[in-house]
Image: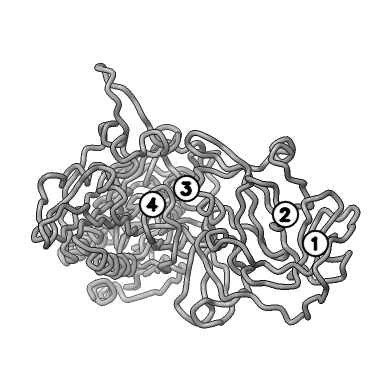
Amino acid sequence: MRFSKFYAPTFKEAPKEASLPSHIFLTRAGFIEQNGAGLYNFLPLGQMVLDKITSVVKDEMDSAGAQQLSFSVVTSGDLWRQSGRFDVFGKELLRFKDRKESDYVISPTNEESAVACVRGKLTSYKQLPINLYQINTKFRDEARPRFGLLRGREFIMKDAYSFHASETDLDREFELMHETYSRIFTRLGLDFRAVEADSGAIGGSGSKEFMVLANNGEDDIICCSACDYAANIEAASRAPRLSDIAAPEAEAAKFYTPGTNTIKDVAEFFRVDEFYTIKAVIKKAIYADSERVVVFFVRGDDELQDVKAQNAAGALELVVAEAEDIAKAGLVAGYCGPVGLASGVEFFIDRELEGATQMICGANEKDYHFVGVSVASFNADRFKDLAAVKAGDKCPKCGAPLEVKKGIEVGHIFKLGQKYSSAMSATFLNENGKAEAFYMGCYGIGVSRLMAVAIEASHDEKGCIWQRQISPFDISVILLNLKDDEAVSYANSIYSELKSLGIRVLYDDRDERFGVKMSDYELMGFPYALLVGKGLKEGKVELISRKGLTKESIEASMAFEIIRQRLCV
């Protein structure tokens, strides 16, 4: 492609709201342009990257036996009512009525469409399993769209839905998709981790996220320093914590503890380590048709993990409980404990506290605490995984120290089980001739997001640094002087020769200054550039590698062969 004929508008300044490198450089380099809040056009360079990502995704999904289709972007609200999600999904679901006052949604995900697609058509276990996927546009009405393609409202996604006759076969497909996703992200040249994750609004019995490591990542990932264990902070677990500090010894009793309404105050008052205290975190849980105060108990030196707490309470959302909410529930802030809690108050205790002895906790009375407490005699369903895992905790698999890294989610795979098929009455006849709801899996990849993630993971202060696997061009041939006939002839010749090998070349034949051409090359970030300039009179041209901007002077007569060796492997 000749740059003089190519549509790639570049800019010196970034949009005012752009803060992340991907948003800044993709906009400045002419890959994307904003079309509204959280809405972006993909310009030719951006479309070329999307096509390359899509090609890899499609190739691996097809190889795994999945079949491609396309669901309507607009989905009937009736299907979402059948699944139970129409009224509970939240404001991110864009709902509207057509001229006949019928309800519709613009799909953020397509579980309902997939179930409706096979319902009544796949009728026997002999027709299973099947995995259907699409690469299509989605819309999620984010309250605060930001960070360019990383948190837009409209996006391109690969989503797949599998149907099975048993949980065992669903487990098999889940592992197959794990392997498939690993191959996809490896082929795209990304440094990623597959991590245990919370299933969120999608639901189901288990899930894994695929996270690309990046300094600007919005998610904290817990990784083992010695083995392959990795998990999103929201789903991370750890080996049970122990303390080298001796436990206090006391008979069970109630103590007068004036003014000790924080864990630090309690630990100092009794001269004990915070490990042996119990912290109460009081929240208000929001449900579809009600709300109530819920208390969560963790060790004094632990922090509550909000998503774990929300899942334990089965709530749509947890918010801070106000003073009047706490008082109305019969609780005493700063002195709340699991022993003698007000009747009817919902509460949960961190699993690591089960069976703990010699603990100190609030006595549910102002200025009083219990000592010598044993965390026993509670129903088993009160104990949940609630504590936030942090750096230095021990790996649940091997016991080595855990580390915290930053990552950006690019893919998510779920075991949905029978959640959607049961709700939507989608059944097949099993081996015994009885109707049974499908076992389902769901597998998503953020295709347009991957473009931004690739830059977050690979850039410098000058611009993008594309991995060759997804770069729109392999090399830019930069002609420095359009009035030099010898240079023009050489540049035209090598441009044609490289193209004949299938190498993707952007030939910068524009009548621009050297500085402009180099700035655009550095901003756009293709793997290589060949500078054809004054050195040609001595038989030399300059080959630049975008990563590190290393330069080497090579023989002009050998340039074609050197480039061929580096790019045709």
Q: CA distance from mark 3 to mark 1?
A: 54 Å
Q: CA distance from mark 3 to mark 4?
A: 31 Å
Q: Residues within 10 Å of mark 1 (few under 14, many from 20)?
A: many
The residue that disc 2 covers is: 340
* Front-most of residues 216 and 312: 312
Q: Are marks 2 and 1 in contact (CB under 8 Å)?
A: yes
Which residue: 79% across, 60% down?
A: 263
498 is higher (above) or lower (below) than 114: below
User: Which element is circle 1 on?
Assistant: strand
Q: Position of residue 171 (x, y in %)?
A: 28, 67
Q: Earlier in the sequence, mark 1 or mark 4?
A: 4
Q: Quadrant of residue 78?
A: top left
Q: Does label 3 or label 4 sit earlier along the sequence?
A: 3
Residue type at mark 3 is His
Residue 69 horizontal/vertical position (percent): 16, 48
Q: Residue at x 45, y 77 (%)?
A: 228
N-term mark: 2 or 4: 4
**Amino acid type at mark 1:** Phe
From the image, tell me which residue sits under label 3: 23
Q: Secondary structure at mark 3?
A: helix
Instruction: Give the left or right position of residue 21, taking residue 528 as reference.
Output: right
